[in-house]
């Protein structure tokens, strides 16, 4: 071998060594699990019926407490879209099949007309947030009317996802899951126990929806919820779970959901390696977890062992500790990170009822009117070592509705009063 050839041969040695070395497996990206309440989100095909009702004029029948259709120009007549009364009852507007007329309001609380163009533009903005910011591998939706509404919200990415819901059943505020097709076939099931079928139809609530997937040979089950609204925390003076202040008090209905919710959670672990409960609990679970005043781990029969079944007729003060009681599987409530201005309020909200005025910096930062205390993740203990972070996602100005500006044809409809939440799991 000639000496002049030696440097060239030595230079090739690292190349040969690299070729001979075993290839290192790429570390998979964490799964992004998301939940988002889209606020009375309906498919474009449902807009004409909604508009036909809300485009009428109404006058309030004070004796009946109901707004009744009247001819335009009638004294006191108000366009359906413009009725500002909270929880207004408009004759002919069936909230089991359509949203209220006054869902979208401008800066001065003026009602906004929901046109096909405005609704389509809202879909486009939701799809952009999902594709660029949320980036879910699995996402649970609340307050969607069904499969078509979800696909429209996913926009151009809809073809990348499988979707399941329960179209046409129960009420229009339905639940849905979407998951990437690359995750494989999923199995969706409905749990109707939370509906409270014993109540009159108008008072019945939303079921639970589960999705089962396989990830690297392990079975992972998700359950999304949208529990009874209005009974958020005892610290606000209104949300003591075991109270009953009359027909308009929401806490008795949430109390009735405790036992069927516990039964549903106990089924989650059967045949699954891991599970995640996610969605809009309409309850500050941190206050229950911290056992603040009015949410002590005690029942109306004075018993404090919440691992035993809740007897019929007995009330509990604490939803979280009653349902997620460690039997049959331990769970963990996941803390959500709120970055940016007002982020420290996320921590304060675990032990305080933070007022609307104090929440202003966080609302301005995140863009959603309900920034804390309602939307949660609860995961099986088997997943705690796999947690890679959880946070609220800002929707910024997209959460605001406004009337059409000069020169514009359509109003702007806010994407939601809730922000998405995202949990990352490393398998």
Image: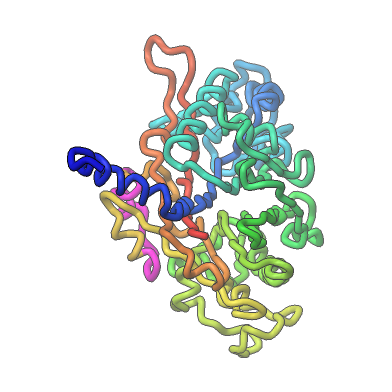
309 in relation to 223, above or below: below
In the picture as drawn, the residue positioned furthest to the top comes out as 407
Query: Does residue 396 appear anywhere in the picture?
Result: yes
Q: Quick check: 83 left or right of 24?
A: right
- Foreground residue among 152 and 207: 152
In the picture as drawn, the residue positioned furthest to the right comes out as 198
- The quadrant holding residue 351 is bottom left
- What's the residue at 59%, 62% (across, down)? 276
324 in relation to 334, above or below: below
343 in relation to 286, above or below: above
Q: Is residue 359 magenta?
A: yes
- What's the residue at 60%, 16% (across, down)? 73
- Foreground residue among 65 and 286: 286
- Which quadrant of the rendered structure holds the N terminus? top left
Picture coordinates of residue 129, whole percent (x, y)? 45, 35
- What's the residue at 43%, 23% (across, down)? 403
Q: Quick check: 137 left or right of 345?
A: right
- Foreground residue among 262 and 377: 377
- What's the residue at 60%, 35% (across, down)? 160
In the rendered structure, which segment of residues is drawn in magenta? 349-364
Q: Is residue 203 magenta?
A: no
318 in relation to 340, above or below: below
Picture coordinates of residue 396, whole percent (x, y)? 36, 38
Q: Quick check: 152 left or right of 394?
A: right
Picture coordinates of residue 373, whole percent (x, y)? 45, 59
Q: Quick check: 298 left or right of 418?
A: right
- The quadrant holding residue 304 is bottom right
What colour scheme has been applied to the protein in the rendered image? Answer: rainbow
Picture coordinates of residue 163, whole percent (x, y)? 68, 40
Query: Does residue 57 appear anywhere in the picture?
Result: no
């Amino acid at each position: 071998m000639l000496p002049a050839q030696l440097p060239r041969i030595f230079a090739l040695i690292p190349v040969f060594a690299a070729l001979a070395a075993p290839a290192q497996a790429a570390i998979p990206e964490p799964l992004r699990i998301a939940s988002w309440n889209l606020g009375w989100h309906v498919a474009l095909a449902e807009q004409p019926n909604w508009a036909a009702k809300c485009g009428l004029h109404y006058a309030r029948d004070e004796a009946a407490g109901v707004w009744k259709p009247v001819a335009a120009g009638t004294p006191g007549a108000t366009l359906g879209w413009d009725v500002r009364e909270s929880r207004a009852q408009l004759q002919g507007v069936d909230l089991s099949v359509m949203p209220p007329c006054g869902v979208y309001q401008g800066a001065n609380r003026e009602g906004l007309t929901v046109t096909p163009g405005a609704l389509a533009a809202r879909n486009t903005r939701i799809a952009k947030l999902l594709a660029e910011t949320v980036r879910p591998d699995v996402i649970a939706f609340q307050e969607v009317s069904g499969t078509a509404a979800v696909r429209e919200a996913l926009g151009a990415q809809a073809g990348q996802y499988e979707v399941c819901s329960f179209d046409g059943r129960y009420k229009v505020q339905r639940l849905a899951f979407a998951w990437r097709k690359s995750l494989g076939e999923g199995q969706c099931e409905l749990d109707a126990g939370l509906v409270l079928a014993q109540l009159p139809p108008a008072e019945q609530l939303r079921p639970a929806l589960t999705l089962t997937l396989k990830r690297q040979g392990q079975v992972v089950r998700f359950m999304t919820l949208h529990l009874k609204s209005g009974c958020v925390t005892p610290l606000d003076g209104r949300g003591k779970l075991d109270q009953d202040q009359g027909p308009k008090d929401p806490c008795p209905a949430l109390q009735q959901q405790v036992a069927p919710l516990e039964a549903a959670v106990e089924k989650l672990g059967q045949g699954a390696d891991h599970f995640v409960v996610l969605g809009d609990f309409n309850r500050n679970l941190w206050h229950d977890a911290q056992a603040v005043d009015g949410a002590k781990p005690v029942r109306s029969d004075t018993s404090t062992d919440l691992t035993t079944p809740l007897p019929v007729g007995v009330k509990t003060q604490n939803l979280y500790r009653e349902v997620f009681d460690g039997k049959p599987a331990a769970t963990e409530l996941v803390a959500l990170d709120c970055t940016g201005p007002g982020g420290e309020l996320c921590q304060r909200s675990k032990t305080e009822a933070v007022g609307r005025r104090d929440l202003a910096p966080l609302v301005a930062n995140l863009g959603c009117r309900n920034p804390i205390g309602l939307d949660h993740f609860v995961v099986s203990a088997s997943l705690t070592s796999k947690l890679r972070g959880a946070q609220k996602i800002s929707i910024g100005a997209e959460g605001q509705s406004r009337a059409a500006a000069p020169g514009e044809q359509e109003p702007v409809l806010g994407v939601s009063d809730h922000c998405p939440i995202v949990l990352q799991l490393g398998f």
